């Protein structure tokens, strides 16, 4: 399993989305964590309402094998 974990990487990015919420209308920025295994994008996990610290935790949990995605 250790070899599988070495292949796991992640990329944190920000994405602009349009929407409405109770405070305002218009564009919002959300964090997205791209979860990679080797050259394969397994998931682009959108994190609306979360901050950069949360996104970093998701990335770290993916790379350490804590997050498991069943096929």
Image (cartoon, rainbow, N blue to C red):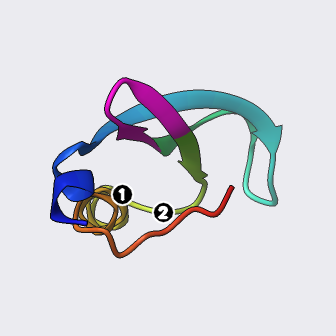
Residues at circles 1 and 2 in contact by the CB criterion of under 8 Å: yes
Q: Residues within 10 Å of mark 2 (few under 14, many from 20)?
A: few
Left or right: 49 as drawn, with respect to 31:
right
Q: How crowded is mark 1: few (under 14 residues within 10 Å), some or many (20 or more)?
A: many
Left or right: 5 as drawn, with respect to 43:
left
The foreground one among 61 and 37 is 37
Alpha carbon distance from label 1 to label 2 = 7 Å
Q: Residue at x 43, y 70 (%)?
A: 67
Residue that badge 2 annotates: 50
Q: Residue at x 49, y 31 (%)?
A: 41
Magenta-tinted stretch = 33-42
Residue 52 position within the rendered picture, expressed as x and y whole percent measured from the top left: 31, 55
Residue 41 painted magenta? yes
The foreground one among 41 and 24 is 41
Instruction: Specify the quadrant of the image occupied by residue 69.
Output: bottom right
The single residue placed furthest to the bottom in the displayed view is 66
Q: Which mark is residue 6?
A: none
The chief SS type of the magenta part is: strand
Q: Which mark is residue 55?
A: 1
SS of the residue at dot 2? Answer: loop
Residue 5 painted magenta? no
Numbered circles on residues, count: 2
Mark 1 or 2, which is nearer the eye? Answer: 1
Q: Which residue is drawn at 16% across and 49% down?
A: 6
SS of the residue at dot 1? Answer: helix
Residue 47 position within the rendered picture, expressed as x and y whole percent measured from the top left: 55, 55
Quarter of the picture containing the C terminus is: bottom right
Q: Which residue is drawn at 27% across and 54% down?
A: 4
Quarter of the picture containing the N terminus is: bottom left
Residue 12 position within the rendered picture, expressed as x and y whole percent measured from the top left: 33, 40
Relative height, residue 11 to residue 22 (above, below): above
Q: In terms of sequence position, does the residue under pointer 1 or pointer 2 come before the other?
A: 2
């Amino acid at each position: 399993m250790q070899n599988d974990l070495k292949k796991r990487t992640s990329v944190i990015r920000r994405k602009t989305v349009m929407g409405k919420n109770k405070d305002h209308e218009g564009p919002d920025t959300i964090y997205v964590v791209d979860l990679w295994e080797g050259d394969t994008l397994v998931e682009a996990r959108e994190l609306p309402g979360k901050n950069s610290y949360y996104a970093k935790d998701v990335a770290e949990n993916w790379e350490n094998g804590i997050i498991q995605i069943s096929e």
